[in-house]
Image (tube, grey):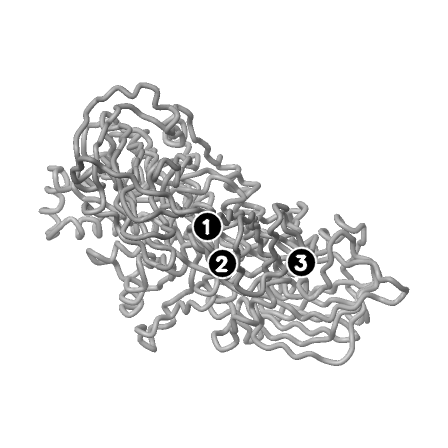
């Protein structure tokens, strides 16, 4: 038994000293995920130094010791395991192999005479014990002081789904085993039972394979644009350590070894596995890579089997994820070997060739008693009867697979991708994209109505995924993961009819205390409403705020930072003078969100200029070179000057997933005038580096990655005003979106929707 200190257990046993000689009493029955049946009873069980554990076999003693050792480490209180089944003050763990309990089902009874947890398996006992831990009174800063009275209660509980998962991509950015263990501790507490470890991708190979040392010598290192390297991998001993750590918490570890696409980190180390005679580098762009493993070479399948053979000694769980997603097949179309294979096997297209590839991978897995999971793209060319699907592009793939009798794990991006924003992207820290607030996760039903009644059993459960293109810090992962993974834990554990979102939010406050004690950097809804950090007005302006779910907001208007004693936001604020507005969200436990600092500025509309001669469009000047910010542009010698009629004509040469021609890197200056239709306050939005209007720097996007537009406001009179746009065309622009071209949008303060600054509004 691993006796490491497990932080989440520490919190469970914390209780503050009673102000008198009476015992502290726990009156809260807050448990997350919500149990199936909870019945409060009269009386209390008193936890004392004399309390003992009683177990009926050796393996349940291991479960008991998991709890006992943590109490001893934190409090110096040492509970013992007794063989006296008649002991009065006891916590009895009873494993009933002949019962009709499910594998994860348990019965917890707390009475004055003692506590009893019954289950069919050790896993059931473990989950019963986790529920008991949440019933203990939880306070900060003090250690448990006995005796403690615990409300009598009877709980019968079992999960709705057998697959309650969390996925972490460590290829795009590498994370330490200590960080992973920290997450496993929290996941186990909330009854998450699968950890999907995404170990390989185009941006890095992260696991030691002894037969292929170059996978880590070369494939684990990614050269960044500035010449630095992002690198890291797990030794096989470290992997064993994590797998064992997870096992002790009844979490199964599912490795992912991506094939045949997302494989350029493999090809960088072993280019002979490609269809082409090329040299490769580990990809430092996100997106889809066109270079893939060659389906027509037997060496490819030998390589895959060699890797699986080593993985099988590290990952005992029966399921292995073998990728199969986002596979461009141009190289296969151009490969004589692949085309010959396709002809010999009677395959009609490259989709069927991928199905052939994946079926061979599945046969390799079966030699090592493993079952294959693939992303839903592998359905395109047909799959074997025993293939399992992870449905990510939506629910459609999962519906199709389940109705054909395949087991499915639901993880549709629009509900389960936790690298997506959980609040307004204009106020939240940078994330991948999309929008998945907490309520959307909680209300998701993994069984779509299109699933036939007798096929619903094939929906094993659901999983929350975290991809790490834009998350390279531990705290960023946690901010994106919590509390949404707790919502998914309840969605997958608690029976559908027992779930109520408002009730979950009430219980979430207890979960926040657990996260705080474990130094988890979780998300607190930010005050939303104004999407700009500057609000210009002429006479007066109203400012309103909301949050993604109900949280108290407090604010100041005197330039000081708000705290728990600041004025509570209750309704729309009105301003008639310059104000430094600062507002935060604050939880019941006193934890505060980041501060939103908004300058509310009274302005006199700026007067237009008069042009003696004008032409439609803007003047464009280009300066060649790679620039990460505007201040790096020293030589402003004119490389090329031309007139453009549309702002979009100064287009980018970089697009998500495409190769980059560095010869096209440049700085673009657009100069001219913008015609404002009427007096008023105008908001402008752009993802360009700088936008100057009427000689004022309205938008200054001074971060290297410009994935989304920023916005700000200015008061202008009707007429023409000087306009200047600075755009750095380089790889740091991010992924292709509507904002990835040179673009400027505007709206009046009274309007909600932005319009494009079109060719009728720009002059030079």
Instruction: Report x, y in % for residue 418.
Output: 44, 53
Question: Is 427 placed above or below 81 here?
Answer: above
Earlier along the polypeptide chain: callout 2 or callout 1?
1
Please, what secondary structure does the residue beneath circle 3 have?
A: loop
Instruction: Report x, y in % for residue 654.
Output: 25, 36
Instruction: Tell me if label 3 and label 1 are in contact, CB under 8 Å.
Output: no
Instruction: Report x, y in % for residue 722.
Output: 30, 37
Q: In this rendered view, identify the residue nearer to me: 79 or 485.
A: 485
Q: CA distance from mark 3 to mark 2?
A: 27 Å
Q: Residues within 10 Å of mark 2 (few under 14, many from 20)?
A: few
Instruction: Report x, y in % for residue 65.
Output: 70, 55
Choose mark 3 or mark 2, whichever is in front: 2
Question: Is 528 placed above or below 335 here?
Answer: below
Which residue is at a point 72% across and 80% down the rendered structure image?
41
Q: Is residue 466 visible?
A: yes
> In the figure, residue 100 lies in which quadrant?
bottom right
Q: Say which residue label 1 marks.
A: 535
Q: Say which residue label 3 marks.
A: 589
Instruction: Tell me if label 2 and label 1 are in contact, CB under 8 Å.
Output: yes
Earlier along the polypeptide chain: callout 3 or callout 1?
1
**Is 324 left or right of 150, judged from the image as shown?**
left
Q: Say which residue label 2 marks.
A: 543
**Is 615 left or right of 535, judged from the image as shown?**
left
Disc number placed over residue 683 in the picture, else none:
none
């Amino acid at each position: 038994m691993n006796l490491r200190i497990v932080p989440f257990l520490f919190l469970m046993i914390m209780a503050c000293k009673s102000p008198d000689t009476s015992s502290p009493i726990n009156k809260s029955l807050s448990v997350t995920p919500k149990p199936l049946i909870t019945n409060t009873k009269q009386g209390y069980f008193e936890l004392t130094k004399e309390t003992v554990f009683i177990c009926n076999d050796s393996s349940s003693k291991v479960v008991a010791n998991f709890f006992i050792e943590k109490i001893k480490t934190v409090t110096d209180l040492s509970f013992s395991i007794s063989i006296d089944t008649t002991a009065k003050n006891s916590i009895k763990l009873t494993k009933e192999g002949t019962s009709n309990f499910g594998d994860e089902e348990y019965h917890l009874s707390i009475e004055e005479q003692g506590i009893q947890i019954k289950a069919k398996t050790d896993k059931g006992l473990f989950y019963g014990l986790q529920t008991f831990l949440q019933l203990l009174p939880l306070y900060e800063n003090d250690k448990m002081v006995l005796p403690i009275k615990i409300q009598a209660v009877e709980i019968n509980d079992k999960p709705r789904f057998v697959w309650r998962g969390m996925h972490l991509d460590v290829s795009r950015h590498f994370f330490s085993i200590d960080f992973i263990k920290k997450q496993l501790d929290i996941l186990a507490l909330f009854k998450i039972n699968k950890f999907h470890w995404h170990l390989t991708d185009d941006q890095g190979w992260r696991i030691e394979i002894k037969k292929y040392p170059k996978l880590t010598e070369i494939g684990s290192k990614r050269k960044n644009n500035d010449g630095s390297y992002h690198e890291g991998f797990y030794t096989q001993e470290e992997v064993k350590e994590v797998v064992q750590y997870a096992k002790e918490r009844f979490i199964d570890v599912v490795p992912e070894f991506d094939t045949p696409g997302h494989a350029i980190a493999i090809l960088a180390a072993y280019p002979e596995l490609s269809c082409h005679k090329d040299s490769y580098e580990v990809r430092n762009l996100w997106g889809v890579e066109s270079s893939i493993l060659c389906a027509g070479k037997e060496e490819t399948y030998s390589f895959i089997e060699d890797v699986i053979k080593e993985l099988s000694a590290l990952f005992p769980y029966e399921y292995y994820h073998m990728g199969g997603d986002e596979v461009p097949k141009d190289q296969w179309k151009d490969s004589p070997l692949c085309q010959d294979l396709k002809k010999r096997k009677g395959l009609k297209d490259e989709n069927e060739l991928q199905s052939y590839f994946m079926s061979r991978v599945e046969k390799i897995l079966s030699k090592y008693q493993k079952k294959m999971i693939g992303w839903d793209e592998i359905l395109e060319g047909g799959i074997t009867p025993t293939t399992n699907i992870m449905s990510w592009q939506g629910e459609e793939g999962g519906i199709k697979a389940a109705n054909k009798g395949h087991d499915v794990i639901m993880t549709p991006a629009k509900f389960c991708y936790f690298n997506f924003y959980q609040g307004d992207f204009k106020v939240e820290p940078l994330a991948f994209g999309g929008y998945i607030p907490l309520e959307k996760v909680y209300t998701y039903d993994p069984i779509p109505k299109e699933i036939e009644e007798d096929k619903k059993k094939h929906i094993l459960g659901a999983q929350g995924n975290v991809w790490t293109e834009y998350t390279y810090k531990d705290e960023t992962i946690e901010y994106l993961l919590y509390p949404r993974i707790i919502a998914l834990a309840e969605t997958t554990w608690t029976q559908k009819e027992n779930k109520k979102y408002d009730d979950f939010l009430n219980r979430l406050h207890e979960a926040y205390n657990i996260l705080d004690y474990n130094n988890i950097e979780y998300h607190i809804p930010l005050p939303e409403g104004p999407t700009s950090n500057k609000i210009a007005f002429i006479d007066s302006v109203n400012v309103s705020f909301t949050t993604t779910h109900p949280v108290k907001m407090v604010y100041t208007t005197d330039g000081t930072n708000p705290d728990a004693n600041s004025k509570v936001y209750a309704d729309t604020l009105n301003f008639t003078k310059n104000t430094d507005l600062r507002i935060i969200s604050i939880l019941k436990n006193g934890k505060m969100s980041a501060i939103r600092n908004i300058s509310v500025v009274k302005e006199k509309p700026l007067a237009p200029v008069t042009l003696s001669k004008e032409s439609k469009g803007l003047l464009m000047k280009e300066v060649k070179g790679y620039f990460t910010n505007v201040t790096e542009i020293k030589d402003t010698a004119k490389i090329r000057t031309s007139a453009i009629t549309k702002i979009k004509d100064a287009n980018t040469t970089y697009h998500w997933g495409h190769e980059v021609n560095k010869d096209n890197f440049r700085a673009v200056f657009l100069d001219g005038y913008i015609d404002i239709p009427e007096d008023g306050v105008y908001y402008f939005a752009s993802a360009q580096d700088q936008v100057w209007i009427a000689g004022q720097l309205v938008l200054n996007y001074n971060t290297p990655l410009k994935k989304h537009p920023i916005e700000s406001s200015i008061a202008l009179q009707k007429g023409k005003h000087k306009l200047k746009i600075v755009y750095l065309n380089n790889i740091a622009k991010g992924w292709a979106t509507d904002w990835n071209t040179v673009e400027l949008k505007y709206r009046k303060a009274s309007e909600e929707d932005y319009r494009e600054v079109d060719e009728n509004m720009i002059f030079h």
